[in-house]
Amino acid sequence: MMFFKLWWYFYYGWLHRMLKWILRRTTGKCELERICSSYPAGAERTRAVEYSLSKSKLAALKILLVSDDLNASDAANNIITLKGVDITRNEGFRPALLQCLRHISGYQKLVSEVTRLQKEKYSTAIDDHEQQLLKLWSLLKPGVPLEARKTKQWGELGFQGNDPATDFRGMGLLGLQNLVFFAENYNRSARKVLSESFHPKFGYSFAVVGINLTSLILELLCKEQLKSHFYNSVSGEPSLYHFHRVYCHVFCEFHDFWFAEEPESVMEFSRILELYKVHLLSRLTTPGMRLHSEFLAD
């Protein structure tokens, strides 16, 4: 262990910087220029740019990785100035760098926005919250009137009690918005999943499972495990819209996974969710991957 620590310190404290200096002298390009010209657009290039910025001696460059209000265009211009890049000799550098910076800043903004929504508690006193909940009912149960705001009918959507507000405690408004997005933008698929969730043997609570899947995707996002997908599939800044679409994909994929496992009862939910998480992570950790489904097609 001590040997590896010494090697790490030696490499990044001295050898790596010397190699960068030699390559700068021999190629006439800084490390970021070499990355942008060597890697294709997508996760490999953006992750390499992230790594390079994280090892920079310049605090002005390191801070780009943690800012959620970054102006990518201004940041690109600052990097070009600080690194002394002659863009007349390398016209492709700025557009390539700009895309990477948009990926990086967009991901940070997305983490902040999603976390804020998760922390915003559902409140029956806020009309917008109530309207979103009623919208969910009308989208999934068209033509079926809701007898009252608090009613056992909510069980038809897979909520646990007479008032769905209590089910959103863990995921806040984010859990509701994901469900509404799924029901509104992919109504046929959402209603199919809801209908099949009442299977006599393999059934589960649609809304409760949906909220748990929001928790899973939020965890993946905050642990940076959705970076490869977003960097490979979004040309600009990843946004809440793209997060919602990943949710729709995961919900339908988990639904199929659940039935393929043929659980003895809903009590196996935690075990099967963990199996699915391992299955999902095995793909998300591949640099060139992007999730594919109708929910993610432009």
Image: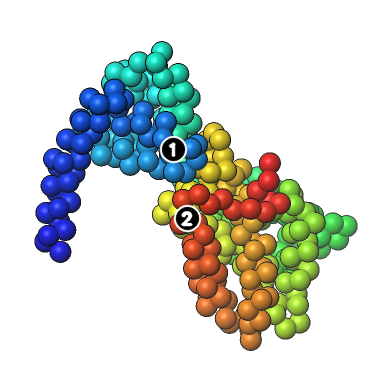
Q: Residue at x 40, y 43 (%)?
A: 47
Circle 1: residue type = Tyr
Compared across the picture, whether 187 is left or right of 59 comes to right
Q: Quadrant of residue 112?
A: top left
The answer to whether one can see residue 170 in this image is no
Sooner in the amino-acid sequence: mark 1 or mark 2: 1
Q: Position of residue 119 (x, y in %)?
A: 48, 51
Q: In the orientation shown, which residue stands out farthest toward the bottom?
A: 264
The residue tagged 1 is 39
The answer to whether one can see residue 217 in this image is yes
In the image, 147 versus 105, the foreground residue is: 105
| Quarter of the picture holding the C terminus | top right
Q: Position of residue 290 (x, y in %)?
A: 56, 50
**Badge number at residue 286:** 2
Circle 2: residue type = Thr
Gap in Å between the C-alphas at discs 1 and 2?
16 Å
Label 1: how many Cα within 10 Å (few below 14, some 14–19, many 20+): some
Q: Secondary structure at mark 1?
A: loop
In the image, 4 versus 37, the foreground residue is: 37
